[in-house]
Amino acid sequence: MVVTVVGEALIDLVLDPVSRTYDPRPGGSPFNVAVGLARLGTPTCLMARMADNAFGRQLRAYAAAEGVDVSAAPLAVEPTTLAVVAIDENAQPTYDFYINGTADWQWTESEMTLLPVATEVLHTGSIAAWTAPGSALLHALAADARAGGTVLVSYDPNVRPLLLGDVLAARKVIERSVATAHVVKASSEDLVWLYPDQPYGDVAMDWLALGPSLVVVTDGPLGATAWRRDSDPVHQPGRPTTVVDTVGAGDAFTSALLSGLVRRELHSPAAVASLTTGDLLAVLTEAVLVSSLTCERAGADPPYLAALS
């Protein structure tokens, strides 16, 4: 595998506004990122604790059918995490989570050894990266990968205020993970909640000082901006889009960001640290395109590689 994604695989129970029934769909930010990477032609492994129940089998079968390697995904005895999703009048999703005692947070030390030795990029983040008890092991896995010097570590906090609670405590946990990563992607919503009084650029520069080489902030229809050390920020405007909903749009952006680096053979720590403005702009352009195409479809349904040509 080139990319290994570690984190939650859950079921989104999406409310149909017409029938008023709930449709169970595979989801979770890391799960969506893995599927997006596979659709973009990037060999991808998913390390997610999928339950031995109907929902867990649905998740495993869906990922495998998309070409994601699930051989490193433990078979969990705990139940599947659920997220109840409603889409508001602005096509924005709201979430209620059922996470107590579910499979995604019960990682063991032995399960950490399942990380494929061929991994060149390790992506983590979202709820699993800051939910105990498993978050400590996921942090150690990322820190060890960073210390090894050859694996590119990517992180997306994917903030969920309802679950994180206290903002000061959340900052500490998220900044700890930022410090282990080479590439950090966050949304403007993430930063507004975490640092309500700071401009995005100030936060990005503070995060770069913690250790990453690249920080990218997405800002909905306004596009995305990337910051590097000792370089001017690079901005890619948004693309005109007829939005159905924004479910999975940020995850699709992350998939395209990582896939763009891999396809250009720029996915080593050294290569990311020396990215040219031209290469970075090309990658951002693709990521904005993939994210916008996802917004034109219902649910987390990212495009395939052919859509980029």
Image (cartoon, helix red, strand yellow):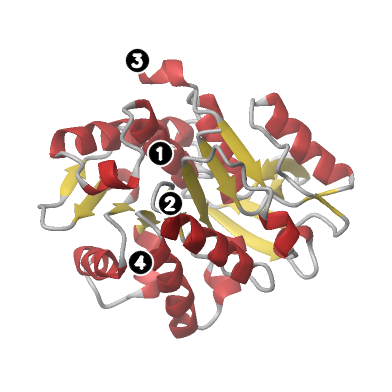
Question: What residue is shown at x 49% (from left), y 83% (from top)?
Answer: 169
CB atoms of marks 2 and 3 within 8 Å: no
Question: What residue is shown at x 64% (from left), y 25% (from top)?
Answer: 67
Which residue bears the numbered disc 3?
A: 309
CA distance for labels 3 and 4: 32 Å
Q: Amino acid at mark 4?
A: Leu
Question: What residue is shown at x 11% (from left), y 57% (from top)?
Answer: 230
CA distance for labels 2 and 1: 8 Å
Q: Nearer the viewer, mark 4 or mark 1?
A: 1
CB atoms of marks 2 and 1 within 8 Å: yes
CA distance for labels 3 and 1: 17 Å
Which residue bears the numbered disc 4?
A: 191
For the residue labelled by badge 3, is the local secondary structure a helix, a strand or a loop?
loop
Which residue bears the numbered disc 2?
A: 154
Task: Point out the image quarter for the N terminus.
Answer: top right
Q: Are there few (<14), some (14-19), or many (20+) residues within 10 Å of tag 2?
A: many
Q: Amino acid at mark 3?
A: Ser
